[in-house]
Amino acid sequence: MSNSNFNWYLKNKYNPAQDWYRNGGKNWIKQYINNYDWVIKNYDLINLGIYRVTLNNVTAYVGESVKVSNRLVVHAWHLANEPEKYYGVLPDEIKNNIVQINMECIEVGIHSKSDRKQKEFEYIKKLNPFTQMKNLNDSYISKDNKRYDSCISKVYRRNVARKILSL
């Protein structure tokens, strides 16, 4: 990720999610994330590793981070605020426990960023997260078509989630 992309991510995603966590989001996590203990216990700690988000026991997302717990808070923030955009699920499906959320650290102690990226890629290949399939992840969308394709991607994500999660 380039410096400008990383700065944008910090300003628009990471920092707002951490503020949300400290100002009530922690309660949302306790209510809607089934195995929330690890996220809360390890919040703000360095735990270099690989994580995954599952919905109804189906892998939705795999990622890597220096602070895995804090990164999972960003995913929780997305699920609390824009679940359809990022995961193809509706807020009421979460609220009514139709969609069960789990977040877990798969592997920790991977100090080298390049090793973490390699492991992340291996886990993505192995676990086949449904939001990271071609045509679902924004990284597959050209910058010229991002605004138009993000609308298509949202609808497509919803259709995939409905099928894969039996919604």
Image (spheres, rainbow, N blue to C red):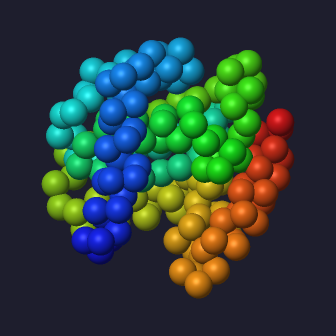
Relative height, residue 16 to residue 142 (above, below): above
Relative height, residue 140 to residue 85 (above, below): below
Whether residue 38 is visible here, answered yes or no, is no
Q: Residue at x 36, y 22 (%)?
A: 23
Whether residue 144 is visible here, answered yes or no, is yes
Q: Position of residue 125 (x, y in %)?
A: 53, 62
Locate residue 142 relative to residue 111 in the image: left or right: right
Q: Quadrant of residue 130?
A: bottom right
Locate residue 159 relative to residue 42 in the image: left or right: right
Locate residue 134 relative to residue 48 in the image: left or right: right
Q: Residue at x 83, y 38 (%)?
A: 166
Q: Where is residue 66 in the image (x, y as percent from the top left)?
A: 23, 49
Q: Where is residue 126 in the image (x, y as percent from the top left)?
A: 53, 57
Q: Which residue is drawn at 56% across and 32% down?
A: 80
Quadrant containing the C terminus in the rendered view: top right
Relative height, residue 31 to residue 14 (above, below): above
Q: Position of residue 29 (x, y in %)?
A: 47, 22
Q: Residue at x 60, y 74 (%)?
A: 146
Residue 112 versus residue 154: which sits nearer the camera?
A: 154
Relative height, residue 112 to residue 139 (above, below): above
Quadrant containing the N terminus in the rendered view: bottom left
Residue 76 versus residue 145: which sits nearer the camera?
A: 145
